[in-house]
Image: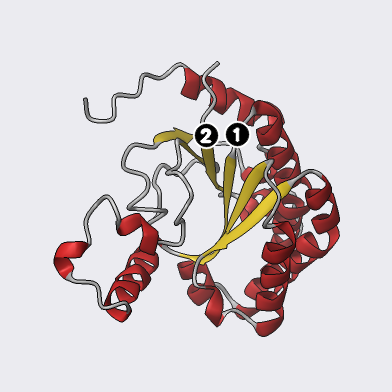
Amino acid sequence: MSIPKHVAIIPDGNRRWAKSKNIPALEGHKTAFEKTLPALLEKADQLGVEFFTFWALSTENFIKRNKMEIEGLLSLGKFFYSHKLDELKRNGVKIKFIGDINILPEDTQAIIKKTTEETKKNSNITFIIAVNYGGRDELMRAMQKVVNMNYLSKSVNKENFGQFLDTNGVPDPDLIIRTGGEMRLSGFMPWQTIYSELYFTDILFPDFNQEELEKAVTEFSNRQRRFGK
């Protein structure tokens, strides 16, 4: 079976999952962070995936969701990092964050910095967490870097532009999975996804288990990728 080097997940459906069970929306996010996500990361590692990206919070979510929900999401993120960090370190997981981190609360930034620093030498699987991430925002920040570094316009091309992106040093996603029945990327990695294989499922993210991930990878392995040839 052909294994994708980089798998990315757009985890849709946490709130709908909670609503279907008549429980608060935050409980859906809690299940996603505490149960679904660790299980998927473990399975990705077992399958031989080298990079695993999870879109935890978009820039649009950060701006448009109500303050209480955002605070709850950030609290769950802090809980995940603080309670799972030792286990991730033991398993050789390297953690990388992408997105506009600088405008997040200072305590969240501190945890992100600590987590990144303490896992930077690990080499088993790279777990990429997208927080306050939006594709257009990433491109705008990349262009600002180009301006700040005084690059000549003719010096920037499609081969080297990636060094200005949040994903610098990370291969483009081979497989992007979106749960929850929506069939769009919602601005996720517009530069990096031109040849990504897309997999959409109606399953709400808290119910997207290890078997479903393996099913998606199996379908990927049966596709023929031409890369424009």
Give how far across and how far down residue 169 sits, in percent. Answer: 47, 52
Quarter-wise, where is residue 72 in the image? bottom right
Residue 22: x, y in percent? 75, 54
Residue 209 visible here: no
Tag 2: Cα neighbours inside 10 Å, few (<14), some, or many (≥20)?
some
How did the renderer colour the structure? Answer: secondary structure
* Secondary structure at numbered mark 2: loop
The number of numbered discs placed on residues in the rendered structure image is 2
Q: Is residue 174 left or right of residue 39?
A: left
Who's the residue at 66% across and 55% down the image? 95
Residue named by callout 2: 5
* Residue 193 percent across, percent down from the top left: 37, 44
First-in-chain label (2 vs 1):
2
Question: Which residue appears at 73% of the width and 54% of the height?
Answer: 33
> Which image quadrant for residue 183?
top left
**Residue 49 badge:** 1
Residue at coordinates 46% horizontally, 69% vertically from top-left? 60
The secondary element bearing badge 1 is classed as loop
Image quadrant for the C terminus?
top left
Amino acid tagged 1: Val
User: Percent from the top left, x then y, of residue 158?
Assistant: 24, 52
Q: Residue at coordinates 68% horizontally, 67% vertically from top-left?
A: 73
